[in-house]
Image (spheres, coloured by chain):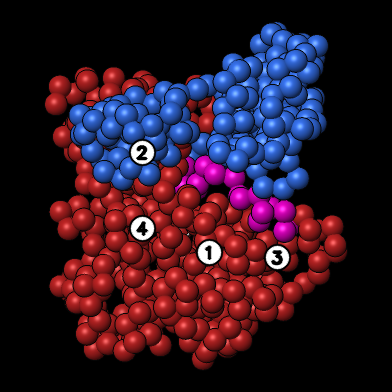
Amino acid sequence: MDEIKLLKLIEKDARISVRDLADVLNESESDVLDQISKLEQQQIICGYHTVINWDKAHNETVSALIEVGATPSKETGYDAIAEKIYRYPEVTTMYLMSGKSEFIVVINGKTMRQVADFVAQKLAPIEGVHRTETYFVLKQYKVEGVVVLSKPNEDKRLIVTP
Amino acid sequence: MSKYVNETIKKIAPSGIRKFFDLANQMEDVVSLGVGEPDFETPWHIRQEAIYAIEHGYTFYTSNRGLDALRQEICKYYQRRFSLSYNWKEEVIVTVGASEGIDLTFRTILNPQDEVILLQPSYVAYEPLVTLAGGVSKIIELKEEHQFKLLPEQLEAAITDKTKILFLNFPSNPTGGIMTYEDYKALIPIIKKHDLLVLSDEIYAELSYDQTFVSIASFEEIKNQVIILNGFSKAYAMTGWRLGYLLAPRDIVTHMIKIHQYGIMCPSTISQYAAVEALKYGDNDCKMHKDSFEARRNFLVNNLNRIGLTCHMPQGAFYVFPSIKNTGLSSEEFAERLLQEQRVAVVPGSAFGTCGQGYIRISYAYSLNQLKEAIKRMERFMQQFNL
Ligand SMILES: Cc1ncc(COP(=O)(O)O)c(C=O)c1O
């Protein structure tokens, strides 16, 4: 079975049924199911999430992208500092980066106050962290490959053509 | 006022697809599987180049043969993808879609009563264009049991002393059939023996799924008897840009250019700039489009077989051409009732030639969700036949 094809299909639509996957990949349903379980066990598939436009859901949230400058400790390198940061549930995404800052951290909060408190009280005091720079998100245009449009894409083609 | 109209034109029947379009177009809530163009929008980087051309005033005529840069890229593309070399200065014309290339070729080549071998079921434009150019169409009926391939004995039987052109279109609209290297190889001695000119409409070349595409021009011994017709519509999702090209021996191009220069001058300059970008940086777009079509093909064919519309896995283009003979209906009846009863639009196979009777053309240039909804409706429709 073409594992990459399978992954790309689920990446685009996590709700696609096993039967549809089997049809698309020209495989049996049981083989597809086995393969998915294997990918989950291997932690190649790490979760199934939904892209939500919270702005439209009348549920105000704030997101911020935070650059974190950090100095690694001799023994444990960057990973130990990273763990101290990403363990907080407010952190939704975290990367080790090349460039000026060591980490990029994305956090979600209910209000700006909450985000600011998180940075001041939780993030900045962590040992090894020497600088933070917080950027608040003003508007989402595209998330996970999806353009967060207000209207769905219409089919602009004629209904029957040769 | 039709008394003014040319007699040949009067005799040409309106397209069967057109009739069906009018019917489907007045209905609400129709799920269409009737479209012969990709559902993708043209890739953004290609559109961006057209915008750039407009903004910077690249809005003048180009040379009759088309932009130098575009012809160079076309030749590089055929070299890179299909290992065929053509001289960009002498052997290429950029046309208004493959459509113009087809018309241009017939008009350049045919004398009155010259015969053109067409393989049906076929794309709807070929036969009328032969008639308009004063030629006579000789139809070979391709068979489902041969996966809609052309067999050497069929070709041999269709040749007369008036035969001038063999017209090929693989991967095929509407059958999705292809020809492999081996399939072509068996035809080459016949083409050579009868000195036929081969027109090869390769517009679906990039949409070949299980086998790599082979052009008949790859056979060195007949390459100077082949005219390749291609375009940007299907591979790059650029149907509305109206841009195509032909590759042909120099001595033929010299004469073709006369019709093209007086009738057309040159295709849209803006489209040509966009096409340069497509050929330079669009290989990955083609690949993405192809992968997506392949997934939909598998999905559709597996589901059609499940609901009793049995068909082979077509190897190219984006069409399935299942038989509906077991329903006892004609193609037109089937398509019309499917539309009336379940609001699904497909094209009757008979629109692609009389031998398309008993088949329908289903396009899979639709999202999986659209295909799914269509399958649901078609399943309900099929239940009445107790198959
Ligand atoms: C087989 C075939 N040839 C040619 C064409 C015309 O293509 P173009 O848009 O390049 O004129 C089509 C369009 O549907 C086609 O299916």
Q: CA–CA distance between discs 3 and 1? A: 14 Å
Q: Chain of mark 2?
A: A
Q: Residue at x 35, y 79 (%)?
A: B218
**Where does residue A120 sit, x and y in percent of width and height?**
78, 18
- Looking at the rendering, the stretch of residues picked out in magenta corresponds to B35-50
Q: Pick whichever, B180 or A122, lies toward us.
A: A122
**Within 10 Å of the Cα at label 2, are there few (<14), some (14-19), or many (20+) other Cα atoms?**
some
Q: Pick whichever, A32 or B158, lies toward us.
A: A32
Residues beneath discs 3 and 2 located on the same chain: no
Foreground disc of the pair 2, 4:
2
The colour of chain A is blue
Return the mark for residue B231: 1
Residues beneath discs 4 and 1 located on the same chain: yes
Residues beneath discs 3 and 4 located on the same chain: yes
Q: Which residue is mark 3?
A: B273
Return the mark for residue A6: 2
